[in-house]
Each structure stands twice: as C-alpha cells, then as structure tokens.
Image: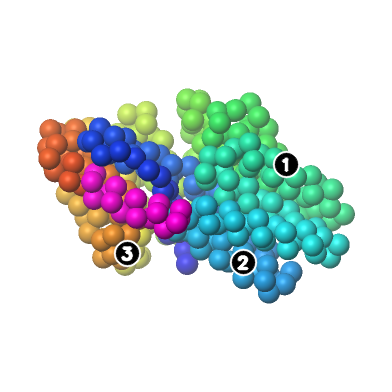
C-alpha cells in the first residue's frame, strides 16, 4: 500500500452537537486534525520495518494496532499498544530495540488523542534507549527525535521542537548523505515547523530543496514528489501566492492523471486542495465542481459511509455555507456527523 494513500488523509473520531455552526466546527476540526497525523503515521510505517522477529504474538498485535490506527480507532489501539509494550519488556533481555519501538508507537497513539504529556514521557524513554544502545541505529533514533519534536510542535513549544528536527537532519545526512529522500522528509518537517510560526523565508528554501532531492532521487512522477508539490502549493496558498499554488497543484494533478488511475486516493487529495484554492479566491463554481469530483472518487473507492468521505462532505458543506446555501450545507454536515458518530461509537463501545 502506498504510504501517501494511507497517511495523508486519516479519520479522527469525536463527538459534537447538532446545530449548523457546531456541525461546521466539527468538520473543520476533522480536517485540521487530519493534517497533523501525516508524519506520526509515516513514522509508524517506518517502525514497522523493524517489527518482525521478536515473537509471533508481538508481531500480530503490532499489526492489529496499526490497522486500528488506520481506521481511527485510537482507544482500542492504545489498549493493544500497551500489551505490545508489556511483551517487549518481558523480552527486554533479548533486544531493547523492541521496547523502544513499542514505546514509540504507544506514544503516537496518545499523541493522536492529544494526550501530549503521556506521549512525551514515552518518547523520552524511547530516545534514551536508542541513545544508550551499543550500536545505535540512526534511523530509529531519527524517528523518535522527529516524533518528540512533533509532540512539542503540536503544543506550540517551537523552541523545544526545532533543535530536535535539526538533530534528526544531521543524523540522517551523516547516515545516508545529504541527497537521500529520507533527508528530504526531515527537511519537510523542519519547514513545517517554520511555516507554523509564520517564518516563511526559512520554510520556503527547505520545501524547495526537499522537492529537488525527491525529483532527482525518485523521479518526477513518484508519489513523494506529488505529495511535496501539494505541500509547497499549500505553503504558497497560505501566503496568498495563488498563481504559484495553482501551478503546483495542476502539475501534481497532471502527473497523477497520466500515471495513476483517476480513482486512486491521491488524486482526490490534490483535487480537494485545488478546489480549496479556488474557494479561497471566491471561484465557487470551479471549487464546487472539483470538490464534487473528489467526493465521487472517494465514495467509489471506500463506499458512501466510510470515514474518509467525511472530509469530502465537510469541504463541500463549508463551500455551500460560505456561499449562503445553508440548507445544502446543513444536510452535508449532518451526513458527515452521522458517519463520524458511528465510527466513534465503534471505537468506544
């Protein structure tokens, strides 16, 4: 499964009320929280590369927890992650790295539930294990550094996050060389930190350099390149550099339509981003048409009641609401809430 298909868009369950204003706030909350999950889930994928070999029970539970996280069932995932950690600790004399992996993954589950104090404590433990290892694995160390930085970033503790991201970059450059795609991912994380602080002059060259690395190392049609084109486009969009943003979104979309099947998930992501750009410029007809196309694609792939469809419904509903079509907006927000509440009840039986 392509990493960006599973990681860029992810459902986040919660409860809410029924009036139009609150329904809209719920949809916005979903969209915002989706954006925060990208790197933490990237790290989960990376850590799974180390997950074979402790014992069958550990492997099975680890995969089960990952599947629950993919479907937004974080409460259930946390319970299983705790069991995974217990198993790793019982085998501590065999291999400490599995304790570190288990601590890292449990921390991510807490982070996705915004339980940052617990996440920070677990990540610090994982970091200590990695730093004290007789033969430290640079990838493992970089993963934990990135996640700890992300926890600080979510809390707007930027001064604590920045040195961790920089340390991660230094480790990966030393291990892989400065032009490796994994280094590009690290640069994107640091750029995102600067962007969240409004330090656009610091963020822009990092985003651009990361894209250059990916294009040279992976080729111009790789999914990582498509993701970075979207990221850089959104960066320009937030600064109202609309022409630059539009060109990058269209470039990504052109690649996807030529290389991938039109129904594939990344295309709906790019479509939603491009529609959002048009919406921000008041081009409502263009935005509506493209939002509808993204919704149709996701409904076809996942079914009309899948949590992923919630984001598409929220996008279209917000557009209608801002354009005075309140009845249509309320219908879509209510449908999104129904899907969301069903998923929430499954995660909290």
Q: Earlier in the sequence, mark 2 or mark 1?
A: 2
The residue stretch that appears in magenta: 333-349
Q: Which residue is mark 2?
A: 61
Q: Nearer the viewer, mark 3 or mark 2?
A: 2
Provide residue 217's location: percent of width, then percent of height: 55, 57
Q: Residue at x 67, y 71 (%)?
A: 57
Is residue 188 visible in this depiction of the protein? Answer: no
Q: Secondary structure at mark 2?
A: helix
Q: Secondary structure at mark 3?
A: helix
Q: Which residue is mark 3?
A: 302
The total number of labels drawn is: 3
Residue lying at the far bottom of the rendered structure: 56
Q: Secondary structure at mark 1?
A: helix
Q: Confirm whether the magenta stretch covers residue 337.
A: yes
Residues packed near mark 2 inside 10 Å, few (<14), some (14 to 19) or many (20 plus): some
Q: Earlier in the sequence, mark 3 or mark 1?
A: 1
Provide residue 28's location: percent of width, then percent of height: 33, 38
> In the figure, residue 49 lies in which quadrant?
bottom right
Residues packed near mark 1 inside 10 Å, few (<14), some (14 to 19) or many (20 plus): some
Q: Residue at x 67, y 61 (%)?
A: 84
Q: Earlier in the sequence, mark 3 or mark 2?
A: 2
Q: Which residue is mark 1?
A: 124
Tell me how far mark 3 sits from mark 2, CA to CA.
25 Å
Tell me how far mark 2 sits from mark 1, CA to CA.
23 Å
What is the image's colouring? rainbow
**Quarter of the rendering occupied by the C terminus:** bottom left
């Amino acid at each position: 499964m392509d990493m960006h298909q599973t990681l860029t868009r992810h459902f986040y369950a919660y409860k809410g009320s029924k009036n139009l204003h609150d329904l809209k706030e719920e949809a916005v909350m979903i969209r915002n929280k989706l954006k925060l999950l990208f790197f933490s889930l990237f790290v989960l994928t990376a850590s799974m590369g180390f997950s074979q070999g402790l014992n069958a029970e550990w492997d099975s539970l680890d995969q089960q927890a990952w599947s629950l996280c993919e479907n937004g069932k974080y409460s259930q995932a946390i319970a299983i992650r705790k069991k995974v950690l217990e198993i790793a600790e019982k085998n501590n004399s065999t291999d400490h790295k599995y304790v570190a992996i288990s601590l890292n993954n449990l921390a991510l589950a807490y982070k996705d539930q915004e339980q940052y104090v617990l996440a920070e404590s677990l990540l610090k433990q994982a970091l200590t294990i990695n730093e004290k290892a007789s033969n430290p694995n640079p990838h493992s160390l970089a993963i934990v550094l990135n996640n700890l930085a992300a926890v600080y970033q979510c809390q707007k503790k930027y001064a604590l996050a920045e040195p961790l991201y920089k340390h991660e970059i230094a480790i990966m450059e030393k291990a892989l060389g400065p032009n490796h795609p994994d280094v590009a991912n690290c640069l994107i994380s640091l750029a995102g930190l600067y962007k969240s602080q409004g330090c656009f002059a610091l963020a822009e060259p990092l985003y651009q350099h990361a894209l250059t690395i990916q294009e040279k190392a992976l080729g111009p049609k790789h999914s990582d390149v498509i993701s970075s084109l979207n990221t850089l486009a959104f960066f320009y969009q937030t600064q109202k550099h609309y022409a630059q943003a539009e060109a990058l979104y269209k470039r990504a979309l052109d690649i996807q339509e030529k290389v991938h099947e039109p129904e594939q998930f990344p295309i709906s992501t790019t479509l939603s981003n491009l529609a959002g750009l048009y919406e921000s410029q008041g081009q409502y007809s263009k935005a509506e048409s493209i939002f509808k196309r993204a919704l149709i694609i996701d409904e076809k792939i996942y079914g009309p009641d899948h949590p992923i469809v919630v984001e598409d419904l929220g996008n279209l509903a917000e557009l209608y609401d801002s354009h005075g079509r309140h009845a249509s907006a309320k219908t879509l927000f209510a449908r999104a809430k129904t899907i969301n509440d069903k998923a929430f009840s499954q995660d909290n039986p």
